[in-house]
Image (cartoon, rainbow, N blue to C red):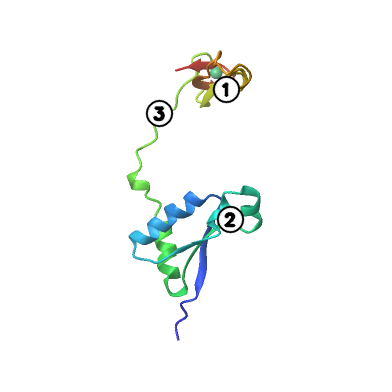
Amino acid sequence: MISNKLVVIAAFNLPFEAHIAKVQLEAADIPSFIADEHMGGLQYYANAIGGVRLLVPRNAMRAAHEALANDFQQYLEELPDPVHCRQCGSENTAPDTQNKFPALITLLLLGVPLLFPKVGMSCEDCQHFESN
Ligand SMILES: [Zn+2]
């Protein structure tokens, strides 16, 4: 006798991650169920109970593993060229936002945004910031 008991196929920290995986399984005609979804919003509890769990019937486990292993890499665009720091030439740069906290404080205290966050790029090596 084949058991159709539900088994945990994956666990996620956030409910939307479980939903993305569920859609992947649906595309492969594999029934799946999300458990503990509403606990997932409460990060501490979600981690304590093993996250948001995705379940499938035991007899679909192998097919589900294969469906989830497909990471849809072919649909992604290639990564853009790294942004070089204008000050030191390093490729070790990352998107950054400055003045977030002071802008939030002035907005909360005064009710008007006197400062605005600056969106740009920071160099990890020389700390140079350049706004967009
Ligand atoms: Zn630099």
Q: Which residue does the numbered mark 2 point to in the structure image? A: 51
Q: Secondary structure at mark 2?
A: loop
Q: Which residue does the numbered mark 3 point to in the structure image? A: 81
Q: Is residue 26 left or right of residue 44?
A: left
Residue 100: numbered disc:
1
Circle 1 residues within 10 Å: few <14, some 14–19, many ≥20: few
Label 2 lies in ligand 1 vicinity (Cβ under 8 Å)? no
- Residue at image point 53% right, 49% down: 14
Circle 3 residues within 10 Å: few <14, some 14–19, many ≥20: few
- Residue at image point 37% right, 50% down: 72
Which of discs 2 and 3 lies nearer the camera? The answer is: 2
Residue 22: numbered disc:
none
Q: CA distance from mark 1 to mark 3?
A: 27 Å
Callouts 2 and 1 close, C-beta under 8 Å: no
Give the residue type that dot 2 points to. Gly
Percent from the top left, x then y, of residue 62?
43, 69
Which of discs 1 and 3 lies nearer the camera? The answer is: 1
- Residue at image point 36% right, 42% down: 76
Give the residue type that dot 3 points to. Asp
Label 3 lies in ligand 1 vicinity (Cβ under 8 Å)? no
Q: CA distance from mark 2 to mark 1?
A: 31 Å
Q: CA distance from mark 2 to mark 3?
A: 35 Å
Closer to the N terminus: mark 2 or mark 3? Answer: 2
Give the residue type that dot 1 points to. Lys
Q: Nearer the viewer, residue 86 or 76?
A: 76
Percent from the top left, x then y, of residue 113?
54, 16
- Number of callouts: 3
Quadrant (top left/top right/bottom left/bottom right) for the C terminus: top left
